Image (spheres, helix red, strand yellow):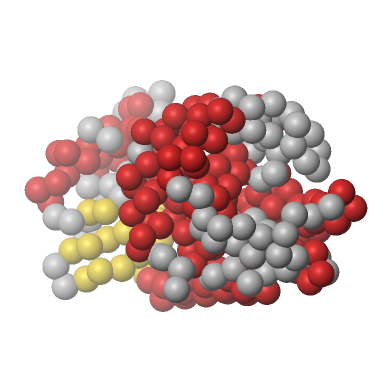
Amino acid sequence: MLMIHSVMFLNMIEKNLLANHIILFDIRILRLKYLMSYGKQLNQGKHGVVLLKIDVRMEGYTGYMLSYLQYTMIKGELLEYIALRHDITDMILQAEETERTQRELIYRMGESVESRSKESGNHVRRVAHYSKILALLYGISEEESEILFVASTMHDMGKIAIPDSILLKPGRLDKDEFSIMKTHSEIGYKLLAGSNLPILKMASTIAYEHHEHFNGNGYPLGIRENDISIYARIVAIVDVFDALISDRVYKKAWNLDKVLDLFENESAKQFDPVLVKLFLENIDKFMEIKKKFEDV
């Protein structure tokens, strides 16, 4: 999708034409120069059809156009073309609103699970922000990092099926209780799996794998290293970080130095060493989030 602001940008856009595989349109004029340039790079194809969505922002108009172009070329020379355009702005805006609603509902569901375990809803807010920061530091795209922001809030969805006597116990769990607690990973996965929505697909994976260890000693699958989803590896770090540095029903908050020592010691054991390095090098960013969404 290209944003066409004015004619003055056409030369700049031309440089990215082939990389984006898009033919440029002005709302009023089909720019044959660019069509011909594109056609030559298609190995001088004789016929072609292009269907594309263009985000158009021009004086007096902001919206989305769906363009259908059929053309005939010989040796790079345009012989004929037909171009049909349809304004799909309302359709796009409705889809965006639906997506925003889905994300809000998922976010609220994550908060509701945390509230049952007597942990502040700020825990899921912090985990969401931490996850996005660490994902971006790792090099994950803005779009994927935004999906992770929402999906991460569902990491403990399976706790909804854990009895209060275990979930709210103000002390260390015994062996049998811990065995029951560990089932929340698989329960969360089963609750979230099966959807075609990218957010829920990612959320189900995170719920299933965020207690796996980089060295293979985690649960429920006992997988290791890159067999663990990168999203789960990210959430594993930030979830433990927030749990350690915050008060919980079973413990008081640790001081920051003690928390950082744990991550240094568990690098390449419980946690992905690359992510741990990024996390420790940018700890100020995570502490800013901690302070911004402090529990009350």
Residue 64 in view in this figure: yes
Residue drawn at x 40%, y 65% as measured from the top left = 293
Residue drawn at x 33%, y 54% as measured from the top left = 288
Judged from this view, the residue extending furthest toward the right is 176
Across and down, in percent, residue 250 comes to 66, 60
Residue 62 shown left or right of residue 217 in the figure: left
Across and down, in percent, residue 218 comes to 74, 37
Observer-nearest residue: 88 or 116?
116
Q: In which quarter of the image is the C terminus?
A: bottom left
In the displayed structure, would residue 163 be above or below residue 179?
A: below
In the displayed structure, would residue 32 be above or below residue 292?
A: above
Residue 61 shown left or right of residue 266 in the figure: left
Across and down, in percent, residue 145 comes to 46, 49
Observer-nearest residue: 139 or 12?
139
Observer-nearest residue: 194 or 153?
153
Residue 266 shown left or right of residue 176 in the figure: left
Residue 26 shown left or right of residue 46 in the figure: left
Across and down, in percent, residue 76 comes to 32, 28
Judged from this view, the residue extending furthest toward the left is 8
Observer-nearest residue: 19 or 211?
211
Q: State how many labels appear.
A: 0
Residue drawn at x 54%, y 35% as measured from the top left = 262
Residue drawn at x 31%, y 50% as measured from the top left = 2
In the displayed structure, would residue 216 be above or below residue 10?
A: above
> Looking at the rendering, which quadrant does residue 221 occupy?
top right
